[in-house]
Amino acid sequence: MPEWDLADLFPGPDSDELHSAITDSITEVRAFRDLYAGKIGDLSGEDLGEAISAYERIQDHLGRISSFSQLLHASDMTDSEISRFYQNIQEKLVDISADLLFFTLEINRVSKEVLDVQLQAKQASYYAPWLRDLRTLLPYQLSDEAEVIFHEKEISGSAAWVRLFDELLSRLRVKIDDSVLTLEEALNCLSDDDAARRRSAAKALGKVFADNIHTFSLITNTLMKDKSIEDGYRGHSSPAASRHLENKVEPEVVGALVSAVRESYPQLSHRYYALKARWFGVSAINYWDRNAPLPGADEKSFAWDEARDIVLSAYRSFSPVLADIGKKFFDNAWIDAVPRPGKALGAFSHSTVPSAHPYILINYLGKPRDVMTLAHELGHGVHQVLAAEQGALMSDTPLTLAETASVFGEQITFRALLKGETNPERRRCMLASKVEDMLNTVVRQIAFYEFERRVHEERKEGELLPSRIGDIWLDSQAESFGPAVRVHSEYRNFWCYIPHFVHTPFYVYAYAFGDCLVNTLYANYQDNSEGFEDRYIEMLRAGGKLRHRELLAPFNLDASEVSFWSRGLNVISDFIDQLEAM
């Protein structure tokens, strides 16, 4: 299996190229500040466009340095030298970028009348989408001094606690029977075909989490308080408000999504888990059996090369353009697939910077879900390659739409596998596995969102005991599981390892947003495939230039309508209908 080569960013942490890049960036940023500080409102439109272009180049240079340190750290979070390098780089970048803060702050202080005149120039108007999004932050912008303090304190504040969380997870070891496993390997045992192995894994994980729960609780409480302080200064109306703003989505749209999913619990998760309990011959399954293979299932294992061919073939059946871009990840050393002690958990695609290319991290163990994960992350990677042409300032897609290509990649891969399977029992197992993945993406993530919302609200009244966090966790999960899933006492601590709660608060609803959006998009594709591929690729190319309303308009879809979410949720319900009929 492949391991990535970060030399496309820099040859190594001690390389002359990296040292020069840091030195050059310091010089470049200081020259930029000397040239433009205090003058933004007086610039012509042409000069403002040139200034933003220079700022964009600097962001690309700094982003390359940051990406290299992050990816190297993700390769092995237990190596002290790598951790030290990562921390030192982040501190240097905070110091360097502090001299850039003036630029966006000054732009936001320019009056609308002056900015409208500046935007009449072609050079400035090119960046109008970036300026539009930047101006949405104006009501929450603080004084220059306060912004600098928040910026510089982050590295010793929230970022330090996030690093502690990551390194703690990477060092956890779980003893299951006679084996000592990493957390990634232990979590993978929850989908083992041996029921006794699943139970042992759940109990062992519960013990490890309980042994470390006070540290996890301290990290969580501290980060929630840190967020609350900043939200208070900026005047955000709720703990999730800043995420909605960053995602460029209206709170009422998120509210409609959350309400629609919660109201669908009985028809989706409750109904499916009751069906699975009947397959297992019990009235209720244990929580560690939620993702278990069906009784008698012959779950196939996929070699890496086979998984690669399956995913690329599925992509090509939909779009040769997407498949050709995806093939580059395999032809070059852009993927790190080998599970290793100390390696970051889970999977991700890091976009790096437009002047380079994305990198994918996955812990590949050969299970069908790993094939789906590969299809998911490759979708992110392809999306990031297409959006890179928008440049460093406008290539990042809001989280609500960033999951579109990844979930669509899963969808087309699953449909291709299902179409090629003629054995009725295997088709049933594949369909059940897909339903479970969709429930994990939609129902479970909205339950996560409800958990986050409640703990952040309660944290305003003071620090939460681990037991109280566990109570909220059990309550939110039980609501989503329904009566057919039996929850045991040790499960109260399973909140502690979810990285999104720590890395990106309130990220989780983006998965449900993306899954429902893709379900609706795919139904649109099935109804009328003519021209769909071109419209879809253009949507991915847009990056962060357009809002969700503008991106969905060519498909005659509107996320603010109740029918939009209902149509997406109905796809899951229809799959469960098929399973009940088998």
Image (cartoon, rainbow, N blue to C red):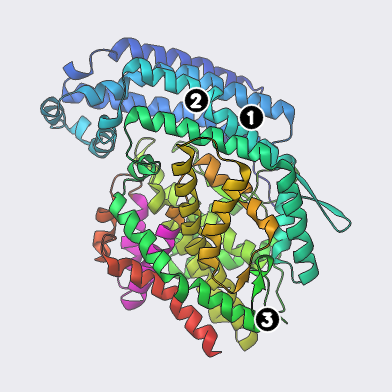
The image quadrant that residue 257 belongs to is: bottom left
Mark 1 / mark 2, whichever is N-terminal = 1
| Residue 81 vertical position relative to residue 327 in the rendered view, above or below | above
Alpha-carbon distance for marks 1 and 2?
A: 28 Å
Does the stretch in magenta take in 30? no
Pair 1/2: label in front:
2
Alpha-carbon distance for marks 3 and 1?
A: 57 Å
Secondary element at image label 3:
loop
The image quadrant that residue 133 belongs to is: top left
Q: Amino acid at mark 3?
A: Val
Does the stretch in magenta take in 513? yes
What percent of the width, then of the height, locates residue 73? 64, 34
In the shown orientation, is residue 526 left or right of residue 381? left
Q: Amino acid at mark 1?
A: Pro
Residue 11's mark? 1
Secondary element at image label 1:
loop
Residue 282's mark? 3
Q: Which residue does the image show at 41% across and 29% down from the upper left?
A: 230
For the record, the magenta segment spans 512-541
For label 2, the residue is: 154
Q: Which residue does the image show at 33% across and 62% down from the upper left?
A: 534
Q: Which residue does the image show at 26% across and 36% down from the upper left?
A: 136
The image quadrant that residue 139 belongs to is: top left
Secondary element at image label 2:
helix
Depth order, front residue of 245/336: 245
Mark 1 in CB contact with mark 2 (< 8 angstroms): no
Q: Quadrant of the N terminus?
A: bottom right
| Residue 506 vertical position relative to residue 531 in the rendered view, above or below | above
Q: Amino acid at mark 2?
A: Glu
